[in-house]
Amino acid sequence: MSDATPRLSLSGISKTYPSVVANAAIDLAVMPGEIHALLGENGAGKSTLMKIVYGVIQPDAGEIRWEGERVAIATPADARRLGIGMVFQHFSLFETLTVAENVAIGLDERASPRALAPRIIDVSHRYGLDVDPARPVYALSVGERQRVEIVRALLGEPRLLILDEPTAVLTPQATEALFAVLRQLAGEGVSILYISHKLDEIRALAVRATVLRGGRVVAAVDPRLETPATLARHMIGRELPPPVARAPHAFGRVRLAAKGLTLDPESPHGTRLESISFELRAGEILGIAGVSGNGQAELLAAIAGERPVPSPAMILLDGKPVGALDAGTRRARGLAYVPERRLGHATVPEMSLAENTLLTAHRRGLVRNGLVRRGAARQLAAETVKAFDVRAGGVLAPAESLSGGNLQKFVVGREVGLAPQVLVVAQPTWGVDVGATAFIRAELVRLRDAGAAVLVVSEDLDELLELSDRIAVLYQGRLTPTADASTHSAESIGLLMGGARDAA
């Protein structure tokens, strides 16, 4: 293969589903050693196209060439044999198996989990993506699961590596470390297809970018010559909304508080919470930063009522102890919750959007005399879909049929629509495009300005700095004292996330 021959070439790739055209006659070429970005709104067809390249689904039309030769990629195993590795935004891990067992299944070579464990440790340390080969996947946070996917792909020594939102759960320091690895891989001739909604990352990393909108290629640019605004304009077809403005105002009374919250993990591989204390006031957004696996899952479960705590007074809602109350009772008292895992936690994958609306919004007149008012549920779901611009095949479409970003818009819209007094939200814009990100953040600020108390747990430091009035960092189950967001930078928060207690 000459240097002028693309490693991967797509010609006229099309894929249509009953309710949507996912890809329409897409052409794309990736050269050896090239870092090529793929941009687009949620639902633009990026994930479908990458699944076609990786053999997960088959195109209706078009041609795929690998190093100049026409190929048919019928399965992911075919893709891996060619030298294609992929890290999905939605993970493909078996919950009941360990990290090493999942890696062993994902590799085509015959190797026992025990034999793979040292290699997993070596690769994870080298890339700053530490994972324990012995841990079961069900005990891992979303961020830790993504690390497993990245390590598994790198162990396959791919010649084309596809990464879908790989830095969503990394600190700035870890992101730079990953970029260094990707640049080194590219220098060695590995091609990289990089999907991200972080436009500054694209401009810093990629040498070419293909932009999709509505399933079609609308631009092919050198991102180094673009600005975030021009890239966003290519993606969404209009000007990007201005940054969220938080008008200064006086905060109200304490709506949510933790007092010396100490909690053992449910899993032996979880994180123990140690004497966590904070106060969240009406009209305030409190941001909590931290790398996944440092106690976020345990903290959120305790606050939402999904786990009991040792003493009811460890969690206070409007000054009253609620630590012994279940999630439903806390919701009835004005608390709403957006968990980080969209499918299987925030929504039931097989249920329609209308049915998923009922899960938390049934108190809004959707159930009368013990009977579900299905028409009202469909209407409320339709209002959420319209208000939050959710791209879906109607309110009867199952949750699992939506792209990750569109499902997130639906979940956030469902909870915001409850007009909660306290909203707890985890990773509000993970995997969400720039336009939807601006909209979701604006809605959170609107809630705050209306007097709600908002707790945001996120690993996106730019997001926390944009949204938060005050910020704290969770590290190994301990929470730093809250501080005014203006006293922090992304770098100082990133250091605190890595354990440097004096970084501020």
Image: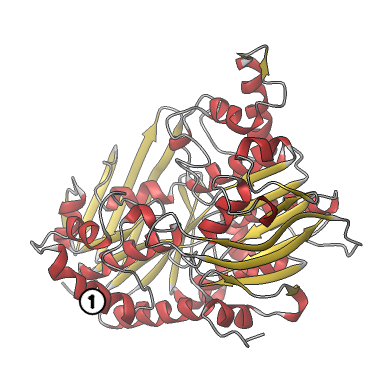
Residue 230 place in picture, x, y as percent = 62, 65
Q: Residue sitting at 52 percent across and 57 percent down?
A: 298
Instruction: Evaluate whether residue 467 shows in this view.
Output: no
Between 126 and 229, the one nearer to me in the picture: 126
Q: Residue sitting at 88 percent across and 65 percent down?
A: 248
Q: Residue sitting at 48 percent across and 62 percent down?
A: 196
Residue 297 place in picture, x, y as percent = 51, 57
**By what rule are the colours in the image chosen?**
secondary structure
Between 404 and 118, the one nearer to me in the picture: 118
The C terminus sits in image quarter:
bottom right
Tag 1 secondary structure: loop
Report crowding for label 1: few under 14, some 14 to 19, many 20 or more residues within 10 A (C-alpha). few
Instruction: Evaluate whether residue 7 shows in this view.
Output: yes
Between 60 and 180, the one nearer to me in the picture: 180
Q: Is residue 104 above or below residue 46?
A: below
Q: Is residue 309 above or below residue 194?
A: above
Q: Is residue 412 above or below residue 185?
A: above
Q: Where does label 1 land, which residue?
A: 3
Residue farthest toward the left in the current orientation of the protein: 110
Q: Is residue 454 above or below residue 410?
A: below
